């Protein structure tokens, strides 16, 4: 990744250069962690451990992509580059905001229904919570559902019908 410490970054503020360095170093740290997870999975004789580490690897790959996107967007913004940044600006109010709100509300309802179903499933799995990975996996899906609700709530809260 191209840094923001050379002459080409003359337009970047000290804060932008510092943040870019932080994001870039985190990308490198994530890469090292990914390598550690791969090595741990290969070294373990446990199928359950390898399965769980595989889930962690998927998360770390996504984290790596997000940090890379953040750094690229910051660089694009700081250098006043043409084109859209990798991480788009908040544009929920572009065009028909009623459509964005309707879509968001419908998706939020689906996620809330999913949360209820997962909570019910987790109760059904109580008897096997110490003998299988199933309860843990449902717990992780509950957390993902809460994350989805947070994302959709953010979009809903940043969409203004009056725009």
Image (cartoon, rainbow, N blue to C red):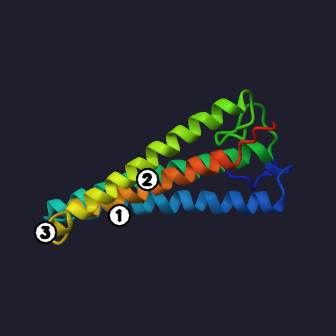
Give the structural element (helix, strand or loop) at label 3: loop
The label number, if any, that marks residue 145 in the structure image: 2
In the picture as drawn, the residue positioned furthest to the bottom comes out as 130
Q: Nearer the viewer, residue 6 or 45?
A: 45
Label 3 near label 1: C-beta < 8 Å? no
Q: Distance between the residues labelled 2 and 3?
A: 24 Å
Query: The C terminus appears in which quarter of the rendering?
Result: top right
Pair 2/3: label in front: 2
> What residue is shown with label 1?
36
The label shown at residue 71 is: none
Label 3 CA crowd tier, 10 Å (few <14, some 14–19, many 20+): few
Q: Where is residue 159 in the image (x, y as percent from the top left)?
A: 71, 42
127 to 137, vertically: above or below: below
Choose between 39 and 133: the one closer to the eye.
133
- Regarding residue 24, the answer to whether it shows in the image is yes
Is 60 or 146 nearer to us in this picture? 146
- Callouts 1 and 2 close, C-beta under 8 Å: no
Q: Residues within 10 Å of mark 1 (few under 14, many from 20)?
A: few
Left or right of 100: which side holds 146? left
Q: Which of marks 1 and 2 is nearer the N terminus?
A: 1
Question: What residue is at 67 percent from the left and 60 percent from the top?
Answer: 21
Relative to 153, residue 26 above or below: below
The residue labelled by disc 3 is 131
Distance CA(mark 1)–CA(mark 3): 27 Å
Which residue is drawn at the image coordinates 38% and 48% (left, top)? 114
Regarding mark 2 in the picture, which secondary structure is present there? helix
Label 1, label 2: how far apart the Cα atoms are? 28 Å
Would you say 79 lies left or right of 38 here? Answer: right
What residue is at 45 percent from the left and 47 percent from the top? 111
């Amino acid at each position: 990744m191209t840094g923001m410490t050379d002459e080409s970054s003359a337009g970047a503020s000290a804060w932008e250069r510092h943040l870019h360095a932080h994001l870039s170093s985190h990308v490198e740290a994530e890469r090292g962690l990914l390598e550690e997870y791969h090595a741990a999975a290969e070294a373990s004789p446990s199928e359950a451990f390898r399965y769980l580490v595989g889930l962690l690897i998927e998360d770390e790959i996504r984290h790596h992509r997000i940090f890379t996107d953040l750094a690229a967007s910051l660089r694009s913004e700081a250098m006043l580059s043409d084109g859209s940044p990798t991480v788009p600006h908040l544009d929920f109010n572009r065009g028909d905001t009623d459509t964005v709100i309707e879509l968001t509300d419908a998706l939020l309802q689906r996620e809330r229904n999913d949360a209820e179903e997962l909570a019910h499933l987790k109760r059904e799995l109580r008897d096997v919570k110490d003998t299988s990975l199933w309860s843990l996996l449902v717990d992780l899906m509950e957390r993902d559902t809460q994350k989805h609700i947070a994302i959709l709530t953010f979009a809903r809260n940043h969409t203004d019908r009056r725009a």
